[in-house]
Amino acid sequence: MAAGIAGGRYLLTCYNCKSVNTKYIFVTGGVVSSLGKGIMSSSLARLLLSRGFRVTIQKFDPYINIDPGTLNPYEHGECYVTNDGHEADLDLGHYERFTNVPTSRANNITSGRIYQSVIDKERRGDYLGKTVQVVPHVTDEIKRRIKQLGNTGNYDFVITEIGGTVGDIESLPFLEAVRQLRWELTDDCLCLHLTYVPFINAAKELKTKPTQHSVKKLQELGIQPDVLVLRTERDIPAAMLRKVAQFCNVSPKAVFQSIDVPTIYEVPLKMHEQGLDDVVLDLLDVDVESRLDLAAWNRFLDKMHSATETVTIGLVGKYVELQDAYKSINESLLQAATYDDHRLCLRYISSERINDGNVAEQLAGLDGVLVAPGFGQRGVEGKFVALRWCRENDVPTFGICLGMQCMVIEFARNVLGLADANSTEMDPKTPHNVIDLMEEQKSISNLGGTMRLGAYRCRLTPGSRVAAIYGTDVIEERHRHRFEFNNDYRDRFEAAGMRCTGENPDAHLVEVVEIPSKRWYIGTQFHPEYKSTVLNPHPLFVDFVRAAIAYKAEKKD
Ligand code: GLN
């Protein structure tokens, strides 16, 4: 194995693969959804990366939407954004947090995108004379996309997660493509199937029948899984795992359990303890002698387990009953708290329920407050009330995207005295449009994929708090918005103490605001949460949580 560092990322030559071909691992799911295929794919990727291999994970989603960008968070949770501006499934966030390797548009494909390219080809005449069909045209397009990242030569392993559950009508073309690829790729691929073993309380028994049925379903489609991972809330006896192996035509050494653990970041260790990575390498004919180095990962987990002190952060948003809506923010806060040897106590506070009368009670006891991103009018007035209280009481406060825009509006209303100040998103006729639609957005009518998306450079004001936090003056962060700070008001804000300390060098869009006289009062138009990973917690989150910890200590004195 030769390893070198290039551009901050490992470049490895897979000398310990007996063959040098890219290896493909397909991850399917059965019995029920929400078993954590994304976490299992990420955990396996972490183990392979920690052995020095180059790995990427991609997600194929069977729904027809071109991307999840127009989906309500109630449907699929948070919309994650990649550097290249793709609005992606939240599993890509797990991939990046576990692997520390950026993903892109090529890592998340939906049925909609597959069909769109097939139909575009048909219109161009690429299939001239042929009847365009699911098999072979749609399946060929799926296969092409599955191999796209592998063909770059940048990866030793491509893990492909197939969304949905085996048996769904809409995932059939994807599974047919996997079936065909297994024959084309022969020894260079394997299929890992994730199922569920329920515990029947009345009988006090774990049941494997749903797993057997799910594997049968996969076999009916022509796919024999090589590895089975059984999700469970209780320890599955070894004899039961052997029985599953026997009934499902899988080698006994390739049947694993994945038991519930206190944190998802323990899953790689639990799977390694049972030998998942060894078995995968063995099945793919890769030398298993490569050394596994999980030292940094273990340090993170040790910190998490040994922390006794807590830091309490309030997340003010409108999707409080749905934790997946703010997935990346939750994980970024958790990583930052862990990094500072604290347990995170995260309190979700519905912005719709906050008013002047109850704000002190709603926000009582918090060491820091994060005001969430979002769209539309619902809950926005509560965000203004919360922000005023935080600003006046000097509580460490972090505003992200809409949260930052709310910081600006609240400041305009209550400090600059512009009582009707607003964003034109909420009130198109506001006399003080301190947040306004970006110029480039004014001619846009289609809603899909048309926001200002992805990574843009931002210049930080030397000497500002945010520049000190980053330790540099030029950064790159990811965006997802249509509205911006209105520069016509900039001087008035600066004069009154809210400073614009981050700016896009080309378009002069304001990307960061801060009130330097406060303990920690920073808003970012970009989304730092998309870049925080286990091994690289984001500096803004680390500093915010550190300020909250310091504030907690001050309150005690
Ligand atoms: N709705 C705001 C905009 O489009 C903020 C978006 C967000 O919070 N992601 O600019």
Image (cartoon, rainbow, N blue to C red):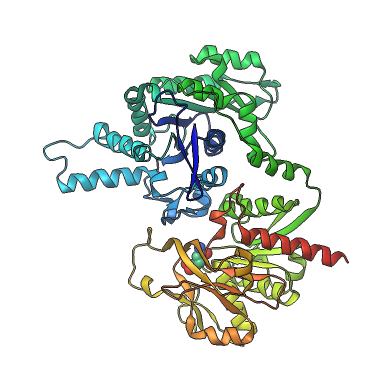
Can you give x and y, in whole percent of width and height, for residue 245 in the image? 54, 15
Pick the front one: 200 or 395: 395
Pick the front one: 545 or 350: 545
Q: How many marks?
A: 0
Return the residue found at the far right.
557
Query: Image check: 468 left or right of 72?
Result: right
Task: Decide if residue 375 is in sight here.
Answer: no
Query: Image check: 122 left or right of 335?
Result: left
Return the residue found at the far left.
129
Pick the front one: 173 or 148: 148
Rendered-image quadrant of the C terminus = bottom right
Can you give x and y, in whole percent of width and height, for residue 491 in the image? 54, 87
Can you give x and y, in whole percent of width and height, for residue 158 in the image? 43, 35
Quadrant position of residue 169: top left
Query: Image check: 117 left or right of 393?
Result: left
Using the image, determine if residue 434 lies above or below residue 174: below
Using the image, determine if residue 471 lies above or below residue 218: below
Can you give x and y, in whole percent of width and height, for residue 282 in the image? 50, 20
Q: For the point 57% across and 87% down, which residue is it?
A: 492
Quadrant position of residue 552: bottom right
Task: Decide if residue 25 is in sight here.
Answer: yes
